[in-house]
Image: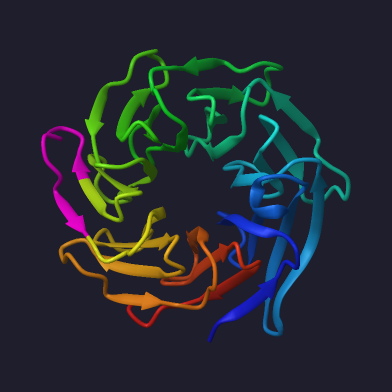
Amino acid sequence: MTLSFKTKDRHGYSVKFSPYLPDRFVCATSQYYGIAGRGTLFVFDILSSGIEPVKIYEWNDGLFDAAWSENNENVVVVGAGDGSLLVYDVTNPKGPLKAFKEHSKEVSSVDWSPTRAENFILTASWDSTIKLWSLDSPHSVATFTGHSGIVYSAIWSPRLPGCFATASGDKTLRVWDRRTPQPQCTIQAHEGEVLTCDWNKYDQNILYSGSVDCSIRGWDIRNYNKPLCEMTGHRFAVRRVKTSPFNGNTLASCSYDFTVRTWDVRQPHAMEITEHHTEFVYGLDFNLHRPGQIVDCGWDSLVHVYKPRSL
């Protein structure tokens, strides 16, 4: 069964399930397809009757990504079109609690470190930089440079402390250690812009990427001269890939071709194609508590929660 919610004139960019509460997720949205206008952060609960917004926060620019805190079930960080990193407490009807602004262009990606003792946040931006933040500091802790294009995604490794990967419009994936200003490796990943990446949850050396060239590729960061695997079938750019928290061979992707696809990385073609959007699909996430449950969102203002048959 698919549960759906329409965010009216807000176009969906990112969805993230809570790591604490199995029935809660957030959705970052923008007016006018992110080109102009305001942004809205929706905090949703999944009820037997459907998807219910429990908090709605407005911001004066588009909102493009969100991530939950790993040590406080009520805290969410959000990347905004004005270059801000916003911090919300969903028990507080007003927000944000804090706004950090150092990026000169929109923040396309935010991610909270899974190492709870560190409490670090990554932001990636259209200004080609990645910044490291601590909520205890009024300024960013570090800035990472070297990409020559937009940095679309910055994702912490779930298994290697202090390690993160970035995906860029310069067609590369890069792997970094937060303590070092230069990347540990640079992977010439695709023939087009790399819009997304995610780590395998079961093998610390495996990383996946999705590109404007419509392909998804797997990489071993110890030996990256050629991809481990390649999955094809999307007809337009792959906007986001997410690896399953329950199966090391499963991932999901969403695309500008209006579809969400589920894959067994050992096979070149999708296990299942879900077509329930009428516009670009931007946001995608797996529920950490319910095996196979997915949430997605798109530019048609629809948010869907469901479980693909293949999962």
- Say if 160 sits above or below 273 in the image: above
Q: Quadrant of residue 141?
A: top right
- Say if 246 sits above or below 172 in the image: below
The prevailing secondary structure element of the residues shown in magenta is: loop
Q: Position of residue 267 (x, y in %)?
A: 16, 66
Left/right of residue 100 with respect to residue 270 in the rendered view: right
Q: In which quarter of the image is the C terminus?
A: bottom left
Left/right of residue 114 with respect to residue 30 in the rendered view: left
User: Which color scheme is applied?
Assistant: rainbow
Res. 75 in view: yes
Left/right of residue 125 with respect to residue 145 in the rendered view: right
In the rendered image, residue 223 lying in the magenta stretch gets the answer yes
Give me the residue at 20% from left, 43% from top: 219
Left/right of residue 69 with respect to residue 219 in the rendered view: right
Give me the residue at 78% from left, 47% from top: 38
Q: Where is residue 29 in the image (x, y as percent from the top left)?
A: 68, 54
Q: Where is residue 77 in the image (x, y as percent from the top left)?
A: 66, 40
Q: Which of 232 and 289 is in front in this view?
A: 232
Magenta-highlighted residues = 219-231
Residue furthest top as drawn:
181
Q: Nearer the viewer, residue 178 or 265?
A: 265
Residue furthest right as drawn:
94
Give me the residue at 81% from left, 35% from top: 97
Res. 30 in view: no
Q: Where is residue 76 in the image (x, y as percent from the top left)?
A: 67, 44
Q: How many labels does the image show?
A: 0
Q: Quadrant of residue 8?
A: bottom right
